[in-house]
């Protein structure tokens, strides 16, 4: 076995979790894939000198975390519309796309869920990538964000994090306390989301898809909670309240039965739908759903979000039975 083959075999089991880690740090699937590439390139270059004093997994996370921190020195935090301004009042007067804003991106579950069938591992991955949680984490300074993820998500010891960040365990614990204090000032619905395969939630989602496809406003009204939120990056306007969301759907998403298709998928550990209008890729709806109704819909507009889910840009193409998209193969550039 060549050194390249050995490196590929040994690092393959960690690529999904490295992608999830970089996504949590950066809030962008595109940037996370680039940073996983960079991580593996750096690891490949240093592999001959890797002495195994730490585990390979720990070594890769060290490289990935430092690569993310370096990238964050030259970038702005990723946001959702609700992180910029208050809710809008006029669904019929939307502003244009704000393409210069570094918007938070969704991440397909198929790219980061463990290949293991262990339910606990799958649930843990889902909970640590909830969209609301990622959005709040982006408000933290990069080092606080890194400490929080390494300590609370990956369960590293304070001494391990201190070694990675070249500081002391006391400083790490102080940084973690500051991060917790910041998060305590934010409310998040992440803890109230039921699992996507929960039967009661699944029934609500099925009704949502059917009602949205047929523009059944009465049914949509019964499924939305009274203070539900609708966001749609890159459009900066967002709306709070059932009545305004229904007005938004009626004025901005006019449809005739059979012109809208909702294809179920999953993102950020939450249920999602790929929305096609007149056969063309329109948006990826990521829903915060509970057994009692839908709290939030973030509709990521534009066809560029469809390929990572393994979905075609038009429904004239057959839907693949199992989305084929995988993080880009980094070893090709080493051969």
Image: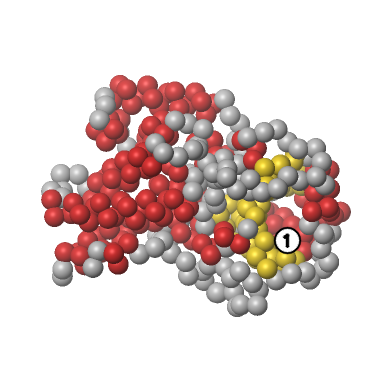
Say left or right for 124 vs 289: left
Q: Position of residue 156 (x, y in %)?
A: 32, 37
Say left or right for 30 vs 205: left
Name the image quarter holding the C terminus: bottom left
Name the image quarter holding the N terminus: bottom left
213 w.r.t. 195: above or below: below
Rendered image coloring scheme: secondary structure
Say left or right for 152 vs 52: right
Quarter of the image holding residue 312? bottom right
Describe the element under mark 1 as helix, strand or loop: helix
Q: Residue drawn 77% across and 64% down? A: 213
Question: Viewer-proximal residue, 283 or 117?
Answer: 283
Residue ID for mark 1: 209
Quarter of the image holding residue 172? top left
Q: Residue drawn 48% across and 70% down? A: 324
Question: Is residue 329 visible in this depiction of the protein?
Answer: yes
Say left or right for 122 vs 147: right
Q: Residue drawn 22% across and 56% down? A: 44
Question: Viewer-proximal residue, 272 or 138?
Answer: 138
136 w.r.t. 278: above or below: above
Q: Position of residue 309 (x, y in %)?
A: 54, 63
Q: Residue drawn 42% across and 51% down? A: 32
Q: Position of residue 37 (x, y in %)?
A: 34, 56
């Amino acid at each position: 076995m060549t050194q390249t083959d050995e490196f590929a075999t040994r690092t393959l089991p960690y690529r999904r979790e490295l992608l999830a880690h970089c996504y949590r740090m950066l809030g962008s699937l595109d940037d996370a894939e680039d940073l996983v590439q960079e991580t593996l390139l750096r690891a490949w270059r240093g592999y001959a000198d890797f002495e195994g004093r730490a585990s390979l997994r720990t070594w890769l996370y060290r490289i990935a975390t430092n690569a993310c921190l370096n990238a964050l020195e030259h970038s702005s935090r990723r946001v959702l519309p609700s992180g910029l301004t208050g809710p809008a009042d006029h669904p019929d007067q939307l502003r244009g796309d704000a393409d210069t804003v570094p918007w938070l991106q969704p991440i397909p579950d198929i790219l980061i869920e463990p290949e293991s069938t262990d339910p606990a591992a799958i649930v843990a991955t889902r909970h640590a990538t909830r969209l609301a949680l990622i959005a709040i984490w982006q408000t933290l300074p990069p080092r606080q964000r890194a400490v929080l993820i390494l300590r609370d998500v990956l369960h590293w010891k304070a001494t391990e994090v201190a070694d990675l960040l070249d500081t002391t365990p006391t400083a790490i614990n102080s940084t973690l306390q500051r991060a917790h204090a910041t998060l305590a000032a934010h409310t998040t619905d992440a803890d109230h989301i039921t699992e996507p395969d929960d039967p009661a939630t699944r029934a609500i989602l099925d009704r949502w898809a059917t009602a949205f496809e047929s523009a059944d406003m009465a049914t949509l009204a019964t499924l939305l909670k009274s203070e539900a939120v609708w966001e749609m990056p890159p459009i900066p306007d967002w709306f709070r309240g059932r009545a305004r969301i229904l007005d938004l759907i009626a004025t901005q998403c006019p449809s005739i039965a059979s012109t809208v298709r909702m294809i179920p998928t999953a993102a950020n550990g939450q249920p999602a739908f790929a929305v096609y209008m007149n056969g063309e890729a329109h948006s990826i709806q990521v829903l915060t759903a509970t057994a009692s109704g839908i709290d939030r819909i973030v509709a990521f507009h534009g066809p560029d979000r469809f390929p990572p889910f393994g979905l075609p840009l038009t429904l004239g193409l057959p839907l693949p039975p199992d989305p084929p998209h995988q993080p880009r193969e980094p070893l090709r550039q080493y051969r």
